[in-house]
Amino acid sequence: MGPVGNDVRNILTVDLEEWFHVCGVGGRLAAENWDRLPTRVEHTTQFVLDMLDRASVRATFFVVGWVAERHPRLIESVRAAGHEIGSHGFSHRRAHDLGPRAFREDLRKSLRALSDVDIPSVTMFRAPEWSINNRSLWALETLVEEGIRVDASMAPLRMVGEPSYPRYPHIRETAAGPITEVPPLVADRFSQVMPLGWGWGLRMSSPRRVIRTIEAVNRAGLPAVLTIHPWEVDPDPPRVPLPPALYFAHYFRLGGFRERLRDVLAGAAFGRIGDMARVSSIA
Ligand SMILES: [Zn+2]
């Protein structure tokens, strides 16, 4: 598993989903209620698109099929702005909750939903909640069998993945062939691994700290991978009761994140996954 991508370009990814796409919760946020919840995704994604346009950044958007089905014009806006589109599953469920058969069906359904909005030949994937881990490594082979060449679902972090996973893009061999794995940026702090490139870790960190870390990664000839969600730039997100870990992951330090994100985007060079030299030759 050698490192991939020596062009020292960083990667920005966007998980295009609704504010209520939270894994593993029922009640008000259960899938059968989604069509009755207030939609925010068009407004918040447009904010992200405008921000990326001003920063001259083209990103990789992992789109939830359920969203593509309901907001075809939004997906067209993303594509027309020069962003790259991958799948974030159809029903936003974790790979290890779905199991092998339902995972494949959900993946196929997401690819059909993207094809129906004129995004054919999708070759990139991210599982909801970084859910390709030791409980679901079979999913990598399924992805290759279904035409996926790049996966970005394995976090080198406890809770959702394993700290021992490689931290930078690399090739993984499966029985169906190779797949390029593109992990998100983590950093060591107080002898813990923290998600510096996404979620609460990115939201709580000062732009200066994030940029300094990215620069150190780049000096080693490697790309840093950041991930954002449209709901994180929502100035007035609907809030619902969640278990403490999920509450933290979803709501901690949203205030001022738009401005901090703008400063991070201005402080380093970001592009799409497909812009990485060796990924382009594989995908
Ligand atoms: Zn997601």
Image (cartoon, grey):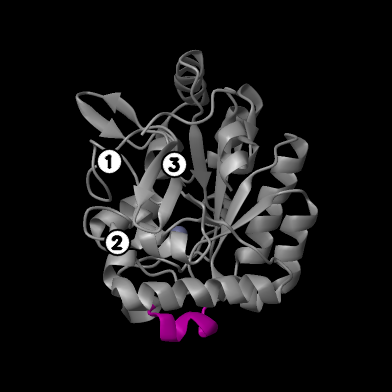
The residue pinned by badge 1 equals 157
Left or right: where does residue 169 sit relative to residue 147? left
Residue bearing the label numbered 3: 198
> Residue drawn 42% across and 34% down?
185
For label 3, the SS is loop
In this picture, is 180 found above or below 122?
above
Determine which residue is flagged by label 2. 138
Please tell me whether the stretch drawn in magenta is mainly helix, strand or loop. helix
Write down the region rendered in magenta.
Answer: 30-37
**Residue flagged by tag 3: what amino acid is it?**
Trp
- On residue 17, which mark appears? none
Q: Secondary structure at mark 1?
A: loop
Residue 14: x and y in percent read 56, 50
The answer to whether one can see residue 239 in this image is no
Q: Amino acid at mark 2?
A: Trp
Rendered-image quarter of ligand 1: bottom left
Q: Secondary structure at mark 2?
A: helix
